Image (tube, rainbow, N blue to C red):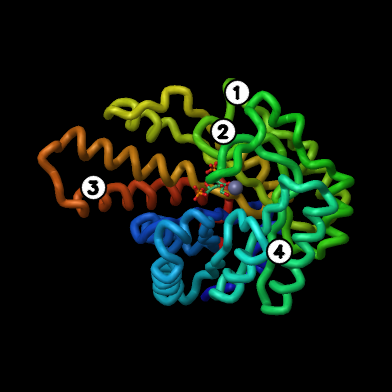
Amino acid sequence: PLVTTKKMFDAAYKGGYAIGAFNVNNMEITQGIVNAIAKTKSPLILQVSKGARKYADMNYLKAIIDVAVEQNPDIPIAMHLDHGDSFETCKQCVDDGFTSVMIDGSHHELEENIAITKKVVEYAHDHGVVVEAELGQLGGIEEDVVGVSSDDVMKHLTDPDQAVEFVEKTGVDSLAIACGTSHGAYKFKEAPKLAYDVIEKISEKIPEFPLVMHGSSSVLPEFKDLINKYGGDMPDAMGVPEEAITEASKMAICKVNIDTDLRMALTAKIREVFATNPSEFDPRKYLGPGRDAIENMVLHKLEVLGCSGKA
Ligand code: G3H
Ligand code: 13P
Ligand code: ZN
Ligand code: NA
């Protein structure tokens, strides 16, 4: 059924794993993800960005997600707004039937971030919807917001004392923190280290409270290599090592955001079909393999997160 993230996060926190939150932009991406969770009976968060709403038309995306939920009545699926930029966007999503929204006020000063988050929490909670907020700054690029540079990521980590104040004052249900990750395919220049101490300190100060890790794609070598082999140009792409994702998932991190790995799986397969069969022009012959690649990637990801079979 369509659910909020409340029970998923409680179980993930206690069980020492994390729920995968996957970005959806079209039917094939959604089906690839949902096929994987249906096979393994795993809980799922499908998330929609403002850009996705604009690209696909929310009515189409909602209809696709509704079918995924109907076809999997025994699996908990949350529909979440990723990086909501204003009260109005969040309100619209609550009114559209989302079960969870993110208000991303991380680029504001603390007081302003608290104020806007509180406003969203009040409206969302009145309508049975849960809220994720963000404190601290990530690197990389998300739509039109440019994060801190990869050299500066470790200087903008979430301050644990501020996190306590933020959670108390806003009543938010989960918090995205900056612990060394970045958005996109170019996260690091050399072997990265996550700030596990930040996760640990926050979880000591706010026990049982679910934390969220954005920018958590691993930039899988399999897809990076296929892209570069078949005419792409992403030689310096680098993500978060899978061992680091597993480590964080065992801690207070209960939601792990993945978009880049989906994009790269789909792109790699399409490039491969185009390069190896240049006469092919039936979209089903390249979107189909792309969808299968997403399914297999997500099956693997569920193992990395520890949430496979936890529905
Ligand atoms: O954090 C950003 C997500 O990857 C969504 O990206 O805003 O381009 O849809 P988007
Ligand atoms: P990636 O770019 O690492 O996939 O992160 C996605 C994300 O954080 C969406 O909110
Ligand atoms: Zn994000
Ligand atoms: Na966890």
Could you give the CA–CA distance between mark 2 and mark 4, rounded to whole angstroms?
26 Å
Name above or below for residue 306 compared with residue 43: above
Q: Residue furthest bottom?
A: 127
Number of numbered labels in the structure image: 4
Label 1 sits on residue:
191
Image side of residue 91 versus residue 277, left or right? right
| Residue 211 appears in view | no
**Residue contact at pointers 1 and 2, CB within 8 angstroms:** yes
The amino acid type found where label 2 is placed reads Pro
Rounded to the nearest whole Å, what is the CA distance between mark 4 and mark 1? 32 Å
Ligand 2 neighbours mark 2 (CB distance < 8 Å): no
The residue under label 3 is 286
Work out whether mark 3 precedes mark 2 in sequence or the reverse, and give the earlier one: 2
Of the two numbered discs 4 and 3 in the rendering, the one whose residue sits closer to the viewer: 3
As helix, strand or loop, the secondary structure at mark 3 comes to helix
User: The C terminus is located in which quarter?
Assistant: bottom right
Q: Amino acid at mark 1?
A: Ala
Amino acid type of the residue tagged 3 in the rendering: Tyr
The residue labelled by disc 4 is 10
Which of the 4 quarters of the picture holds residue 107? top right
Mark 1 CB lies closer than 8 A to ligand 2? no
Q: First in sequence: mark 1 or mark 3?
A: 1
